[in-house]
Amino acid sequence: MKTIQEKINQKEDELKKLKIQLEEEKDKSEWIYIKELKIEVQTKINHKGKSYDELKEEFGEEYLEENLPTYNELKELRNLEYKGKYKLGLENTWEFVNQEDLIAKEKGKVARFGADSGGLGLDADRGSGGSDSDLGVRFVRRNIKKK
Amino acid sequence: MKTKKQLLQEKKKIEKQLKEIENQELYIEVPELGIKITKTQQYNGLEYKEILKEVEEKQIATHNLLIDLRNIASDSNWKKYSFIKDIWVFVPNPDKVAKSLGKVAGFGAYSYGLNLYTDRISDCSDSNLGVFLFEKLEKQK
């Protein structure tokens, strides 16, 4: 016969497992595979209100450089969304992208992608300390092997 | 004495040679990208739709091409292709949303960064705003 403490421990273990499963499910729902680009991308932007410097502190520079989308990826995704494929919120967004302009990168500038119902913009000349409550980040996963 | 036909053929030949010489002056080869591109902005001061009366859109350098060229130029410490350092040009609009609204795309690059905007009104023009033209290099046998 189990003691009360053993029963509590068992329930706590079950709860922990459920929490992990829930997190995994939540994580799955946040990512979508884009067959046209062979990447996985987060369906929403996160970490709004943080500057690039703060994101760098949280995730590390290497992670950001590897997992931030490029401008071209977001542009392609927006065009796909416009055609009715996928739902990524790229009709109205403001997010950090990989800095591909080497001159700006050398000077410590970061790149931002913005889009609304009238068009899109790339600013590859912004200071890394800037933030805004609407400015966020989404990550991509590359080298995905999917059929 | 040359016939009229011969004279016309000769005229055509010389016109072709002239065009080639003009092109040599106008373009610079970029073997890294397999293209040749104009050394200066063309058609400054014209609206985009007016430029499209002069050239086909596929001849106009895209922002991606210009970014690649800029990075190559920067890598060489501006010893190569330094004309790309400060530019302000129309590029083919990469955004289908903006294109469907009839907007045009402007691309600017300078000493500390670059900007691309796809939502500019179609009748905008400026004496410093033009295009770069490019052609693919013929593969050498």
Image (cartoon, coloured by chain):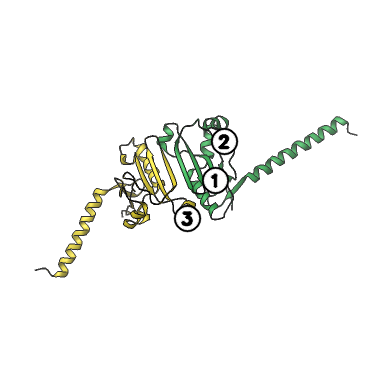
Chain colours: A green, B yellow
- Identify the image quadrant of the C terminus of chain B: bottom left
- Badge 2, how many Cα within 10 Å: few under 14, some, many 20+? few
Query: Where residue A75 sits: x, y (%)?
Result: 49, 48
Query: What label does residue A133 carry, if any?
Result: 2
- Badge 3, how many Cα within 10 Å: few under 14, some, many 20+? few
Tell me, yes or no, whether dots 3 and 1 are on the same chain. Answer: no
Camera-side residue of B3 and B130: B130
* Residue beneath disc 1: A92
Query: Where residue A13 sits: x, y (%)?
Result: 78, 35
Q: Looking at the picture, which amino acid does disc 3 mark?
A: Ser
Q: Earlier in the sequence, mark 2 or mark 1?
A: 1
What chain is tagged by disc 2?
Answer: A
> Relative to residue B94, is residue A27 drawn left or right?
right
> Relative to residue B136, is residue A47 drawn left or right?
right
Query: Where residue A76 sits: x, y (%)?
Result: 50, 50
Residue furthest right in the image: A1
The residue tagged with tag 3: helix, strand or loop? helix
Q: Looking at the picture, which amino acid does disc 1 mark?
A: Asn
- Counting the numbered discs, the total is 3
Camera-side residue of A21 and B49: B49
* Residue beneath disc 3: B100
- Identify the image quadrant of the N terminus of chain B: bottom left
- Residue shown at 58%/41% (left/top)? A45
What chain is tagged by disc 1?
Answer: A
Query: How far apart in space, not on screen, are marks 3 and 2 (Cα)?
Result: 30 Å
What chain is tagged by disc 3?
Answer: B
Q: Looking at the picture, which amino acid does disc 2 mark?
A: Ser
Query: What label does residue A29 carry, if any?
Result: none
Q: Do labels 3 and 1 touch, CB within 8 Å? A: no
The residue tagged with tag 1: helix, strand or loop? loop
Q: Vertical placement of B127 versus A59: above or below? A: below
